Image (cartoon, helix red, strand yellow):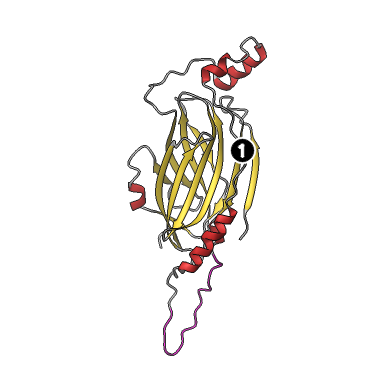
C-alpha cells in the first residue's frame, strides 16, 4: 500500500473575498484493497465456477483497516485564537494600506443575517465523473437519513472528484476540513482528510470546494457496498455538518 501526501498552496486572486488557503489531501485510499483476482476461471469436471463478486474475508478487511490506521498521520498544528469579524476590522484601523487590504478581503459592508442562521451551511455534495450517465448529487439541506437507504452506483476503476458547496454567513471561519471515512461490513477501510481553507462571510453566494482526483477501486474483492461517513469541520472542531451515505462499486454503471 502506498500513502500519498500532497500539499498545494492556492490564492484565488479573482475572488478577493476568499482567504488564501492550503489544501492538503491525505489519501490512504481504497486502493489499499488487495489486487483483483483473475476473472477467468477454468471449471473442473466436478464443479462449475462463475464470475460472481467475491466478498473479502474478515481477515482481509482487518488487514486493510490496520494498514489505514498506520497511514493516518496527525499534523502537529495549533490553530490561532479565533477573532470575530468586528475585532479583525478594528485591528490597526489607522493603517490605511491594511484597511484597504481587509476591505478587499472581507468587504466593506456589514454582514446582515438572521442570528439563528448557522455560520457555516453545507448545502450539497456532488460526485463528479466524466463517464457517469448523470450527475450524482446529494442535497444536504433535506432529509439526510435518506442517503443511506439509496446508495450511489459508481463504476469500478473510474476517476472522480467530490465537490462540496457551502456558505459562510457571519464570521470568518478558519481551517475548514472535509473528513471522509469509508466502511465495508462495519470495518473502516479508508479515511481521507481534505484541508478546505479559511473563508470570510458571504451569505448571498456559495463557495465551492473540489477534492483531488481519485480512482474508484476495482476488482472482484473491491465490488460491493460501502458506507461513507462525511464531516465538515474546522480548526475549532465545530461540527458544521455530518452525514452518512452509501456507495455501490459495480462492474458497470448499470450492472
Residue 56 location, x and y as percent?
Answer: 47, 68
Q: Main secondary structure of the magenta part?
A: loop
Residue furthest out toward the bottom: 45
Q: Is residue 220 visible?
A: no
**Foreground residue, 93 or 248?**
93
Report the side of 110 relative to 140 (left or right). right
172 drawn magenta: no
**Foreground residue, 82 or 208?**
82
Say which element carries label 1.
Answer: loop
**Looking at the picture, does residue 248 appear above or below residue 209?**
below
Q: Residue at x 40, y 49 (%)?
A: 245
Q: Residue at x 45, y 45 (%)?
A: 230
**Crowd tier of the residue under label 1, counting other residues whose Cα lies within 10 Å: few below 14, some 14–19, many 20 or above:** few
Q: Residue at x 39, y 26 (%)?
A: 117
**Foreground residue, 187 or 33?**
187
Residue 248 location, x and y as percent?
Answer: 42, 58
Per the rendered image, the range of residues in magenta is: 34-49
Q: Which residue is mark 1?
A: 77
Residue furthest out toward the top: 94
Residue 11 location, x and y as percent?
Answer: 63, 32
**Looking at the picture, does residue 89 appear above or below residue 63?**
above
**Looking at the picture, does residue 90 appear above or below residue 170?**
above
45 drawn magenta: yes
**Can you say which quadrant of the picture contains the N terminus?**
bottom right
Residue 97 location, x and y as percent?
Answer: 67, 14
**Foreground residue, 238 or 19?**
238
**Can you say which quadrant of the picture contains the C terminus?**
bottom left
Q: Is residue 2 visible?
A: yes
Q: How many marks?
A: 1
Amino acid at each position: 500500500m502506498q500513502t500519498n501526501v500532497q500539499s498545494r498552496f492556492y490564492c484565488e486572486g479573482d475572488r478577493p473575498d476568499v482567504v488564501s488557503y492550503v489544501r492538503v489531501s491525505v489519501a490512504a485510499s481504497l486502493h489499499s484493497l488487495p489486487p483483483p483476482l483473475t476473472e477467468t476461471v477454468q471449471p473442473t469436471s466436478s464443479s462449475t465456477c462463475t464470475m460472481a463478486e467475491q466478498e473479502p474475508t474478515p481477515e482481509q478487511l482487518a488487514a486493510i483497516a490496520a494498514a489505514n490506521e498506520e497511514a493516518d498521520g496527525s499534523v502537529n498544528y495549533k490553530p490561532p485564537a479565533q477573532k470575530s469579524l468586528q475585532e479583525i476590522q478594528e485591528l490597526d484601523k489607522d493603517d490605511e494600506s491594511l484597511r484597504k487590504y481587509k476591505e478587499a478581503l472581507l468587504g466593506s459592508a456589514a454582514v446582515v443575517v438572521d442570528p439563528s442562521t448557522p455560520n457555516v451551511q453545507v448545502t450539497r455534495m456532488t460526485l463528479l465523473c466524466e463517464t457517469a450517465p448523470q450527475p450524482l448529487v446529494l442535497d444536504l439541506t433535506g432529509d439526510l437519513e435518506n442517503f443511506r437507504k439509496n446508495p450511489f452506483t459508481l463504476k469500478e476503476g473510474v476517476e472522480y472528484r467530490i465537490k462540496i458547496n457551502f456558505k459562510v454567513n457571519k464570521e470568518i471561519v478558519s481551517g475548514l476540513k472535509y473528513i471522509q471515512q469509508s466502511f465495508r461490513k462495519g470495518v473502516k477501510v479508508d479515511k481521507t482528510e481534505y484541508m478546505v481553507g479559511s473563508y470570510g462571510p458571504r451569505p448571498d453566494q456559495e463557495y465551492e470546494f473540489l477534492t483531488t482526483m481519485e480512482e474508484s477501486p476495482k476488482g472482484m474483492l473491491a465490488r460491493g457496498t460501502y458506507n461513507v461517513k462525511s464531516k465538515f469541520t474546522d480548526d475549532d472542531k465545530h461540527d458544521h455538518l455530518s452525514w452518512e451515505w452509501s456507495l455501490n462499486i459495480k462492474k458497470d454503471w448499470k450492472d
